[in-house]
Image (spheres, rainbow, N blue to C red):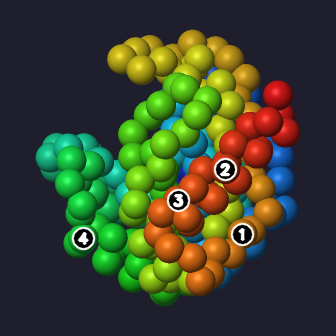
Amino acid sequence: MIYWIGYYLVKILSFIFCPLKIYGRENVPAQGSLVLASNHQSNLDPLLIAISLRRKIHFMTKDSLFRNKILGFILRKGNAFPVRRDSADIRSLREAIRRVKNGGGLLIFPQGTRQLEPVLQGQQGIGFLVVKTQVPVIPVWVSDSEKVMPPGSKWLKRHAVSVTFGQPKYYSGQEYEEIVDRVMKDILVLRNSRS
């Protein structure tokens, strides 16, 4: 219930501050296990990706946001769970695997944190997750969200944002490092398709 209330509230705000152009939404199945792997330029990215879809998704969210009890409660009800970004968080990865194997769609930012540079550097977690779940990975490219909420900004500036979903990809029989490299290249392909 809280998920869908938040979903429609963010949709309303997006009409005001960041009108969305959505491409490739038909590439995301309406149900079933999958991983969405996206670039990350703004704190708005998880919300904008979520409202671009017509299904619930799960989120790995930095653990510091859960320290506030009210915000932590809202995040958990909104399908988010904490991840420690300063170390290999095995407990968080296990929770991610559990949710995916139970039929969920999981949004992950392979970069681990926001990066404005076009050359994306991925972390090992996405490789581990893909090997353990063996589900399709859908690359995602969010464009111009950093213009609505630049890093360090507390206020929103009106600007159109585009969200592009690629074709589902399968990465089987590969090492973690190779999977990370392939995922990041597939995300960049979407960037180039919109430039």
Disc 2 crowd rating (10 Å Cα; few below 14, some 14-19, many 20+) is some
Question: Mark 3 — residue?
Answer: 180
Q: Nearer the viewer, residue 115 or 45?
A: 115
Is any part of residue 70 visible from this angle?
Answer: no
Q: Residue 26, located in which quarter of the rendered image?
A: bottom right
From this view, report whether residue 140 is shown above or below residue 131.
above
Question: Mark 4 — residue?
Answer: 90
Question: Residue at image x 47%, y 31%?
Answer: 115
Name which residue type carries label 1: Lys
Rounded to the nearest angstrom, the CA distance separating label 3 from label 2 is: 9 Å
Quick one: label 4 or label 3, which is nearer the N terminus? 4
Q: Residue 195, located in which quarter of the rendered image?
A: top right
Question: Residue at image x 39%, y 39%?
Answer: 113
| Mark 4 or mark 3, whichever is nearer to me | 3
Q: How many marks?
A: 4
Q: Nearer the viewer, residue 39 or 124?
A: 124
Question: Residue at image x 73%, y 23%?
Answer: 160
Q: Is residue 162 left or right of residue 35?
A: right
User: Are the residues at dot 4 and dot 2 in contact (C-beta closer than 8 Å)?
Assistant: no
Disc 3 crowd rating (10 Å Cα; few below 14, some 14-19, many 20+) is many
Element at badge 3? Answer: helix
Question: Mark 1 — residue?
Answer: 169
Element at badge 2? Answer: helix
Q: Nearer the viewer, residue 141 or 182?
A: 182
Disc 1 crowd rating (10 Å Cα; few below 14, some 14-19, many 20+) is some
Quick one: label 1 or label 4, which is nearer the N terminus? 4
Quick one: label 1 or label 3, which is nearer the N terminus? 1
